[in-house]
Image (tube, rainbow, N blue to C red):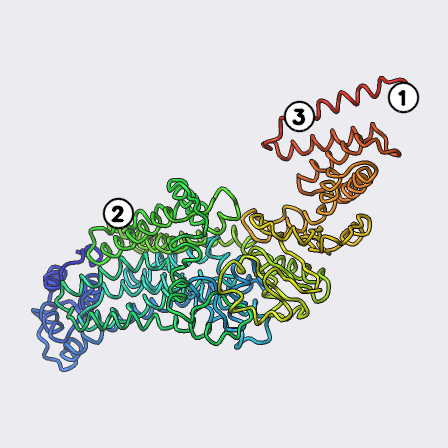
Amino acid sequence: MKPTHLQPVAAQRWKAEIVVFLWPVPRALSLAVRKSQVLAVTCICRQIGQPLKRRDCESVRMLASPELSLKSEQHEQELSPAWMLKEMNGQMSWEVRKSWILSGAIAVCVAALYLPCVQKTVPGGDSGELITAACELGVAHPPGYPVFTLLAWLSMRLLPWLSPAHSVNLMSSLLGALASGTLCLTVCRLEGPVPGAALAGGMFAVSRLTWQWSVVAEVFTLNNLCVGLLFFLFACFHCADNGLQRSKVAYFGAFCCGFGLCNQHTLVLYIVIIIPWVLHRLYSKKELSVSMFFSLAVTFGAGLLPYTYIPVSSYINTARWSWGDQTSLSGLLTHLLRSEYGTFSLAKTSGSVNMTSMLQAQLDHCLADLSLPVLILAGNGLVLSVNDKKCGTISLLVTAMLLVYSLFFAWRANLDIGRPLLLGVVERFWLQSDAAVCVLAGIGLNRTCSILERKLGIGALWKIIGWLLTVSLLVHVVHTNHKECNLSTNSVVERFGLELLDSVPKNSIILTRGDLPGNSLRYLHYCRHVRQDVQLVDQEMMTYNWYIAKLGHHLQGVHFPGLTGTQRDVVACIGLPDEDQSWMQSFSRWPFGVCDYLVPVQKKFHPQDWAQRTHHIYNWSEPHNSFSPSSWERVANEEMWQARMKTAFFLFDLAERMMGEAKARLFELSYTLYKDIVETYSQYPSNWDKNFALACERMLRSGHQGYSAESLLTCSVQHFRLYLQKEPNDPQASAIRSAITHLSKEKDRLHHRPEGTI
């Protein structure tokens, strides 16, 4: 038999396997051949996961050379137990070193791939808020993310020559590279330094989703690292040689479980599977005592110590941006349990998504981002290793984690994934399950190569094929995703915030609403110190009782409630909440680009002057529809494009409520503004066509002199048709078609009228 043909056996039977392997050899064979036999025993012992001890080496020596007379002192030394122990365990140590070298190489290669792609400016979403909280050591949104906040603060201090956003984005990319290394190391611990290990770490790192969220400041890369560490630790625990090693790994794992929960609470869905399994293994081996149980609990609690940062920061209260009041136990629990969002939910909304739809979306993501071959290998990893004593338990545990996490998340994710932006929010949480799929795929590749080798022989060939498959898959995915994931030149969200800040009057109060303006403006104002003359007030945060008490003293010159008693300009970005109309008693809302300008109701509006003031309010050059629908860049770009027609829309809406000559003037001004922007750009939002067609039709009805009725009719019909081409599923499509028919008939009647009649 060859060593690779042997199956792992129980610890008490490993010598029997050696007896089967060591066939009798003629006396005439050289000592080198016998030494090669002994070295081959190393492969068997490595395969069955047993250490070699000195007393075992004496038995192996006698088995290897029962007929050899070792009279020579040199021969006695070369086949002595000491020599055999050194050679055999040396081989195993070299395997361990190769595993660390391979994992380190994967991490370095991933870092070399990520670093040039890191975004140098503030990203969209929660990134701006996380960086802002770290800038002045405040508290981020629930559950607080204290580890990420402290690491981000440290990265800013270590890289002071970079912008805060750039330094934290770099930190995230390095965490992502380390995460890929831990997944590679997990497979190495189970299978050795094989191609499957490189596939597990590499494929996870270069998949679109992982890559995108590893080059921006987000908590997901740190969570990926915690997941990888847990996988590696429970693999080490399972493969431990003795009780002392198991206890060491158990303590370290308990600390990592607590530490990981200081970043992302979704990790608890893996921890609830790992902890019972570890305790059961310790108990079954009679290694779990009451004192050890409580020691593990204390170690787990020690991992949670970073959470002490949150009440300390809240008590000091020096950060100009911080979320919540955690100075009391109830306030701390409210924050940790995400009660203001909804515990175990993604948002405060009460809506839900069908579990089947969510699971289907996750499967579609796996097929698109991880590829079909990886999913097939993951299935092979489970099926081919399920009866293996060493890998079978780990494969089943990883599969259980994957299923529990996917089902629970599909049940609790209460965002409408039919909207691209919200799908982008949801899919980030699939990274945790992607890590499990990649580990199974790595095991599957190695198991597939081993079966082919056993059935068809030529072992080296299948190993080479495994490496070629791994490299080809990784190169293909890198080539496919590099353009989309290279964010080094992406500055859309930061430029969006700068344009808003540059446009507002001096000493303004800016009422922010939503993540896009709120997080980008906070970062620029508090971290980059842009427009220190203005004050930022978050409309949504003002609904919480703690907001004014904790942050009111940082807003000098802002009086609550209702911003009364101030002579400062007030700008709302983006808009005002629909459920609260109390502002209408004292203020009017005028269009001001993306924002709204709030003025006292008694102030007179001059349409022509306001149109001139807001006509070129921003210097924005991004093409329309130039970003992914699920990205914040798409939202920022769309807001800037819609801002170009906001004044025209406001004037049209105002004209609808007016009478007489004022109505005609407002329609004419609205028509002029719409005509200007539609003729200036070849590609623009589809609603511009609809609005411009309506403006043409209203100009025709108002009977305004100086405009050809035929040209207005032609323009209206043309842009209604263009709109239907772009938006064929508009709910008002039938009404628009009726309007086109009616306007076309009017145009025909106009051609048949006697000259000079109207």
Q: Nearer the viewer, mark 1 or mark 3?
A: 1
The numbered disc on residue 383 is 2
- Mark 1 Cα-neighbour bin, 10 Å: few <14, some 14–19, many ≥20: few
Q: Which residue is mark 3?
A: 737
The answer to whether residue 382 is above or below residue 250 is: above
Q: Secondary structure at mark 3?
A: helix
Indicate whether 100 appears above or below 476.
below
- Viewer-proximal residue among 427 and 104: 427
Mark positioned earlier in the residue sequence (3 or 2)? 2
**Mark sitting earlier along the chain (1/3):** 3
Instruction: Indicate the amino acid at tag 2.
Output: Val
Which of marks 1 and 2 precedes in the sequence? 2
Does the CB distance between marks 1 and 3 fall below 8 Å?
no
Amino acid carrying label 3: it is: Arg
Task: Characterize the local packing of mark 3: few (<14), some (14-19) or many (20 or more) Cα atoms within 10 angstroms.
Answer: some
Is 634 on the left-hand or right-hand side of 697? left
Q: Nearer the viewer, residue 748 or 184?
A: 748
